[in-house]
Image (spheres, rainbow, N blue to C red):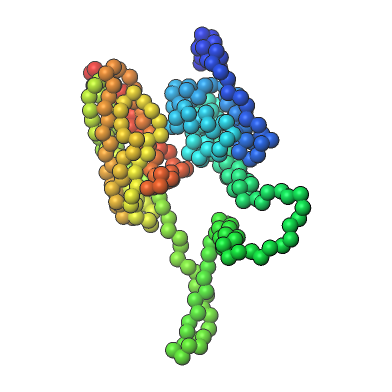
């Protein structure tokens, strides 16, 4: 690790080294092992270093959990893990890396879902049993979901005669599905690099535009990292119709001493699910000190 002193390396190595995930334990373990090998290739930085000096927009604990192989990390956490190592540290092309790892993550998620619904192995083949309405509904739903994932739907509208007969089938393409999207319009207050005094409060404001066809309601910005500055873990997003812009405010309190605060947020719905996982987080980036 060229940018780490020998003393820093000795301190880091004195801690308990996490065990390598088992690639044979299943799709999640294999994916975690792939992350583990990337970290080794990038010089084996600690998770604290990845979340701190390398500025991954994910917490130290989230990055560590991603490479343990117990649960599949979210795409957001995966991308921050990969980005700071493969792109920022190893200098690889961001678009190529994102495409490659998105495919790895998607395959792992699909394999994990298959394992979750696979029936347990039995020593003897049981006699066939009539399938319940509930099981039939689940199988049908799974088949429909698989079809929706790979193709657009078309519908056929039948024109009816007043008497009830068919005038003929008129094929028609259904309206395009709703599209949820956003665009960052800019910083309204405290642009990146602004110097703010220690032990003070300020309000950061961003402007976003709803560029999709879905109204934003019951949404918020969820904080995804920690810094010396104090700020809410969740910031409400006012209701915003398609085409409208919205100003989002977050109160921030600076620490008592000098430093730097770079805080990331991602938009989420009322269930806490991350929206727009392929987009970079919204962030504030200020310097704390005396002018």
> Who's the residue at 54% across and 10% down the image?
10
| Residue 118 or residue 266, whichever sits in front | 118
> Who's the residue at 55% across and 39% down the image?
72
Residue 47, position as x, y percentages in the image: 50, 24
Report whether 278 appears left or right of 240.
right
Report whether 65 appears left or right of 287.
right
Report whether 171 appears left or right of 211.
right
Looking at the picture, does residue 243 appear above or below residue 105? below
> Who's the residue at 61% across and 47% down the image?
116
In which image quadrant can residue 249 be found? Answer: top left
Residue 2, position as x, y percentages in the image: 54, 15
Q: Residue furthest right?
A: 124
Question: Which image quarter is the N terminus in?
Answer: top right
Total marks in image: 0
Question: Which image quarter is the C terminus in?
Answer: top left
Residue 144 visible here? no
Report whether 18 appears left or right of 226.
right
In which image quadrant can residue 129 be found? Answer: bottom right
> Who's the residue at 53% across and 64% down the image?
153
In which image quadrant can residue 162 be found? Answer: bottom left
Looking at the picture, does residue 92 appear above or below residue 168? above
| Residue 105 or residue 282, whichever sits in front | 105
Residue 142 visible here? yes
Residue 60, position as x, y percentages in the image: 47, 27
Q: Residue furthest top?
A: 7
């Amino acid at each position: 690790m060229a940018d780490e002193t020998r003393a820093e390396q000795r301190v880091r190595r004195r801690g308990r080294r996490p065990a390598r995930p088992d690639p044979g334990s299943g799709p999640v373990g294999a994916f975690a092992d792939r992350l583990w090998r990337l970290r080794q290739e990038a010089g084996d930085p600690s998770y604290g270093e990845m979340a701190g000096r390398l500025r991954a927009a994910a917490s130290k604990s989230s990055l560590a959990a991603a490479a343990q192989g117990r649960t599949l990390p979210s795409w957001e956490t995966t991308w921050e893990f990969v980005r700071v190592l493969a792109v920022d540290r190893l200098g690889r092309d961001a678009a190529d890396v994102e495409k490659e790892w998105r495919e790895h993550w998607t395959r792992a998620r699909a394999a994990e879902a298959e394992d979750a619904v696979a029936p347990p192995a039995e020593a003897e083949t049981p006699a066939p049993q009539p399938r319940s309405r509930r099981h039939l509904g689940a199988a049908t739903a799974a088949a429909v979901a698989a079809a929706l994932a790979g193709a657009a739907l078309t519908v056929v509208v039948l024109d009816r005669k007043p008497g009830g007969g068919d005038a003929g089938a008129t094929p028609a393409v259904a309206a395009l599905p709703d599209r949820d999207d956003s665009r960052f319009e800019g910083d309204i207050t405290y642009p990146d690099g602004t110097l703010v005094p220690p032990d003070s409060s300020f309000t950061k404001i961003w402007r976003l535009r709803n560029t999709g066809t879905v109204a934003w309601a019951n949404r918020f910005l969820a904080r995804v990292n920690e810094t010396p500055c104090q700020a809410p873990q969740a910031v409400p997003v006012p209701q915003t119709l398609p085409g409208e812009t919205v100003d989002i405010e977050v109160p921030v309190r600076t620490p008592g001493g000098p430093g730097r605060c770079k805080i990331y947020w991602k938009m989420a719905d009322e269930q806490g699910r991350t929206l727009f996982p392929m987009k970079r987080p919204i962030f504030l980036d200020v310097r704390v000190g005396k002018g």
